[in-house]
Amino acid sequence: MSIAIIVIYTLALTLLFFYCLMQLSLAIHYLKYKKNLKEHPENIEMEIPEGKYPFVTVQLPIYNELYVIERLIDAVCEFDYPKDKFEVQVLDDSIDETVELVAKRVAEWKEKGINIIQLRRIGNDRKGFKAGALQEGLKTAKGEFIAIFDADFVPYPDFLLKTIPHFLHDNKVGVVQTKWEHLNKDYSILTKMQAFALDMHFTIEQTGRNAAGYFINFNGTAGLWRKATITEAGGWMSDTLTEDLDLSYRAQLKGWKFKYVEGVVSPSELPTDMNAVKSQQFRWNKGGAETAKKMGRSIMKSQLPLKVKLHAIAHLFNTTNYIFIFLTGILSVPLLLIKNVEIQFNYFKYASVFLIGSIAIAYSYYVSTQQREITAKKTWKVFLARFPVFLAITMGLSLHNAWAVFRGWLGHKTAFVRTPKFNIISSKDIWKNKKYIPKKIHPITYIEGLLTLYFLSGVVMGLYYGDYGLMPFHMMAAIGFGLIFYFSMKHSRIKS
């Protein structure tokens, strides 16, 4: 048993180590891209030739968005783009008051000359959820290009003017993805940590992959598709919870290029309660596993260059890292006992090589932080304040997310549970006592509470044996699971 624990622990650490090195390589590609951009600036202010505006369909897939749908409709209807050159489809699968709100807003904008329609599927049919709604809307979409926005976004008026030129510049570009900006990133510790993680994705990962010629993904919103790309790739499919990642890989395997434009930002609202964060994480991680299972073999069989294949596989399988994160955590406590009672050799003397991986991932997040802060002092201040908390919360979510990934790999089918939004922008805004807040406490939450005690026992054990090597990790894990348990319970008991 002791040998089995050491082998599994080492294997999990090894796989996480290689993932960290992959992230480091993306950070290096990102920095090279930024350096090259300084020396040879791109023409990022490309313009649409006069009188050559292509027709665009803007799709808004929504389901019960009582608090945010009006601001989204207003934002897209105010696009600085010829009115006769774009249409808006509100793909409304709602079953509450949202339906009436949408109908009223659509009528108001129609009177102002905007080509906008509320599309509802017959019999309140939500087959395929978001993917099904997008595919249904595509049947009547007139646009050569399809812009997509989730309900929590508030795009700027010049969105189309800044993105459409990238398609006109290269007819092999099938997708233009923009960077997410966070309207409420400083609202709470939860929003700060979400912003910290997402900013890494939208700087280092997306730009790094794109600059190196690796596969990237459409992020489900705040981007545009060439309609022909969707059609040629097989259309939207609902056999995974991440229909955006799935279609992205199918399209790139067909030879379509993806363009990530870091300089164009699209504001959005981050979830403010723990259960909403968990539902979003579940969807992303389970869907990631489902897509990896579906597309992994196609990537390996493709004629892509080896480097592109390796990064594509790493990208597809990155959600599986939560299983390895959880394993390293849960096995570290018995490993401490084994090290001090059964096996007389210094395991950590050899395992210390894995610290390189920790340094690599820390550096990647530092570079990401550096892009948003003005001075080196401010960069270090923000990084040192947030990176340890981010690691703790990542560990705290590892059981929940590993369970999602495990279910994805096993092929268990689950509904597309959308993340509720409450129009929370400033600290004065209140999301409590509003609709859509889940009240049911998931059994995993109770296990997260027990794991808090489990890792505290690891701290006590380290003190008992005078072995402090794993103590910082056990303290971090106890804090992480404790935070997740506390907020999950607190946010489930709010009265509506």
Image (cartoon, grey):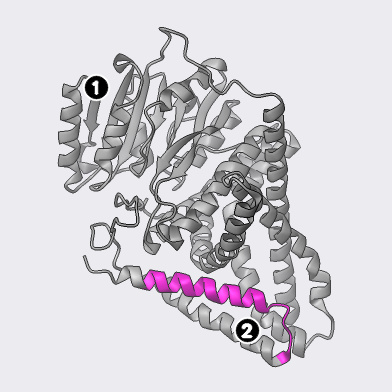
| Residue at the disc numbered 2 | 459
Label 1: few (<14), some (14–19) or many (≥20) C-alpha neighbours in 10 Å: many
Q: Residue furthest top?
A: 51
Quarter that holds the N terminus: bottom right
Q: Element under label 2?
A: helix
Quarter that holds the C terminus: bottom left
| Rendering coords of residue 478 (x, y %) | 55, 77
Left or right, 335 with reference to 126: right
| Residue at the disc numbered 1 | 114
Residue sitting nearer the eye, 237 or 163? 163
Does residue 487 belong to the magenta stretch? Answer: yes
CA gap between label 2 and label 1 equals 63 Å
Q: Element under label 1?
A: loop
Q: Is there any visible trace of residue 480 in the rendered image?
A: yes
Residue located at (42% from left, 28% from top): 159
Q: Which amino acid type is shown beneath numbered disc 2?
A: Val
Residue located at (41% from left, 14% from top): 54
Residue 280 picture quarter: bottom left
Residue 475 picture quarter: bottom right
Residue sitting nearer the eye, 273 or 436? 273
| Rendering coords of residue 363 (x, y %) | 69, 53
Secondary structure, magenta segment, majority class: helix
Magenta region: which residues? Answer: 465-489
Left or right, 147 with reference to 1: left
